[in-house]
Amino acid sequence: MEGVVTRTTGSFHSVRSDDGIIMNCKLKGNFRIKDIRTTNPVAVGDRVLVEWHPDKQLGLITKIFDRDNYIIRRATKLSKESHIIAANMDQVVLVACVAFPRTSTGFIDRFLVTSEAYHIPAVLVFNKTDLYPPELLAPLAELEAIYKAAGYPFLKVSAVNGEGLQELRAILKDKVSLISGHSGVGKSTLINVLEPALKLKVLEISSYHLKGQHATTFAEMLPLTGGGYIIDTPGIKEFGLTDFNKKEVAERFPEMRALMHECRYSNCTHTNEPGCAVIPAVNAGRIAPSRYDNYLRIFYGRDWGEDKY
Ligand code: GDP
Ligand code: ZN
């Protein structure tokens, strides 16, 4: 039987068969995945072949089909091993806020660079619009202009008053979407509003920043009644590139990518070269200063300090 991994906890994996039956499974034997050293051989979103044993009510995963894409993070800070967060996504959705809590452009741009590196379309969803006082509406409009100009879908939503939820539903429909964003931005609340039957745990606003709040960190694929799936990633703060190639950073910024071929030197780093096509676009305001600044920070591998989360 073929199916999709919807949840993995330790050595047990839930697999949804093509006719919608959830099977409790284990891996058969040892699995090796080419090229990547991972701590988990099978991830949420993986398409697998299952040998079902009705007597034991247990399935054995005998094959993992090639992944269209996957995203990883380093298993631990110093580790060379990676942890696959999810596989075979149609898009990644970053839930963000301009306040309560604020999502920095550094965080957003690292997220977008990562999604570009994995060739997975990204969507930005700014939640809690019901909370924003007038003085925060201008920064929100500015962010909207920046990211729409860079080519990203940008939604303004409120899980509380329902603003933008219809558009969000339309974006999620019939797709496999990974939902990301730091703790407290309202991911669980939004998912619960979209799918009340799921009843995800929503943290009190006062406690979301407490350390260790999310002890368990496993991704889970949840069905949407309107069609499609979301992959919830509780406790996963940020995903990342394990192999980082400086030369590729500019290509991960669509608005820079569109201009780079006009630079005089093909190996232009867009930092100080004569004849660079990117720098004048920044000076003329056609590329947002925050985007260029974050390009430089990623390019030089600068410490993000307070901006990290
Ligand atoms: P998560 O950590 O991203 O899953 O965030 P939660 O869903 O746990 O939400 C964190 C807090 O923000 C909770 O107190 C929610 O009630 C609150 N919240 C979520 N969405 C909204 C919204 O659209 N408007 C307002 N005012 N509060 C929200
Ligand atoms: Zn250049």
Image (cartoon, rainbow, N blue to C red):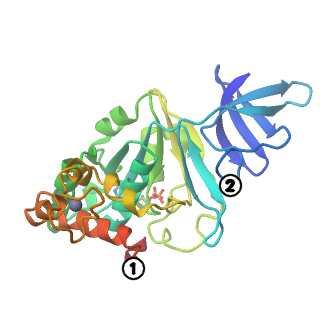
Question: Is 134 in front, or is 93?
Answer: 93
Mark 1 is surrounded, within 10 Å at the Cα level, by few (under 14), some (14 to 19) or many (20 or more) other residues, namely few
Q: Is mark 2 within 8 Å of ligand 1?
A: no
Tell me the kind of residue under disc 2.
Answer: Arg
Tag 2–tag 1 contact (CB < 8 Å): no
Residue 23 position, x and y percent, is 75, 31
Q: Quadrant of residue 39?
A: bottom right
Residue drawn at point x = 56 percent, y = 74 percent:
211
Mark 2 is surrounded, within 10 Å at the Cα level, by few (under 14), some (14 to 19) or many (20 or more) other residues, namely some
**In which of the image's four quarters is ligand 1 placed?**
bottom left
Question: Is 111 in front, or is 129?
Answer: 111
Numbered badge on residue 231: none
Judge left or right: residue 193 versus residue 242: left
Residue 2 position, x and y percent, is 69, 24
Judge left or right: residue 59 versus residue 205: right
Q: Secondary structure at mark 1?
A: helix
Q: Is residue 133 above or below residue 170?
A: below
Residue drawn at point x = 45 percent, y = 62 percent:
182
Q: Is residue 99 visible?
A: no
Location of the N terminus by quadrant is top right
Residue drawn at point x = 24 percent, y = 70 percent:
271
Location of the C terminus by quadrant is bottom left
Q: Quadrant of residue 18?
A: top right
Q: Which residue is mark 1?
A: 306
Give the alpha-carbon distance from disc 2 to disc 1, as whole Å: 31 Å
Tell me the kind of residue under disc 1.
Answer: Glu
Q: Is mark 1 within 8 Å of ligand 1?
A: no
Judge left or right: residue 50 versus residue 189: right
Mark in the foreground, 2 or 1: 2
Q: Which residue is mark 2?
A: 37
Judge left or right: residue 151 versus residue 121: left
